[in-house]
Image (spheres, helix red, strand yellow):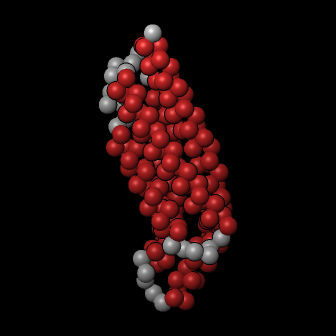
Amino acid sequence: MSFGFAIGDFIAVLKLASDVTNALNESRGVSADLRLLVMRLNSLERAIQNAVQTVKDWDAAYPNPSNKAPLNALAEEHNICKRLLENFHEKSRRYTESIFNGQGSKMTKEWAKIKWCIFHSDDIAQLERNLRLHILAIDMYSSELRRYIDNSLVMEKY
């Protein structure tokens, strides 16, 4: 693709969001913030899937567009979400490894979950808020690109 990013970049963030979601789903009963974050990560997955399809359609309709600003904006939102997820993953790795890798007794795992919630509840809430804003932006840019593609296709028929 000629836009400075590839579909593979979107797929990588989609995989990262899916991995974090799966890990968080395995820690049932942790907190309301965590459940909200899981829902937000599911929204991110859907937004990225939609963006991937939109970019593919855009690329097919406009292989060498003169205006790359909407695609660049979409790519930047994608990069922001990727950094947010990577930073969260790195900060929480110490606490999540024992929870999600099945290490230790049931009591050890439960204690690790409690520590994880205590030490990362602010991080969880902040990540959820940040992702919410950037998911809205991804959805907005994808919708605008989709509208432009659809309008152009209609204009070509006439």
- Coordinates of residue 134 in the picture (x, y in percent): 58, 42
Is 143 displayed left or right of 153 in the figure? right
Image height check: is 26 above or below 150? below
Is 153 displayed left or right of 36 in the figure? left
Task: Mark yes or no: residue 75 visible.
Answer: no
Image height check: is 8 above or below 108? above
- Coordinates of residue 147 in the picture (x, y in percent): 53, 26
Q: Please name the residue shown 41% across and 38% down the image.
A: 53
Quarter in which the C terminus is drawn: top left
Q: Please name the residue shown 55% across and 51% down the image.
A: 43
Quarter in which the N terminus is drawn: top left
Q: Please name the residue shown 62% across and 76% down the image.
A: 29
- Coordinates of residue 23 in the picture (x, y in percent): 48, 68
Q: Residue furthest top?
A: 158
Tell me the quarter of the picture where residue 37 sits. Answer: bottom right
Q: How many marks?
A: 0
Q: Please name the residue shown 57% across and 44% down the image.
A: 135
- Viewer-closest of 88 and 30: 30
Task: Mark yes or no: residue 93 visible.
Answer: yes
Q: Residue furthest front?
A: 158
Image height check: is 73 above or below 102? above
Tell me the quarter of the picture where residue 111 sits. Answer: bottom right
- Coordinates of residue 36 in the picture (x, y in percent): 64, 60
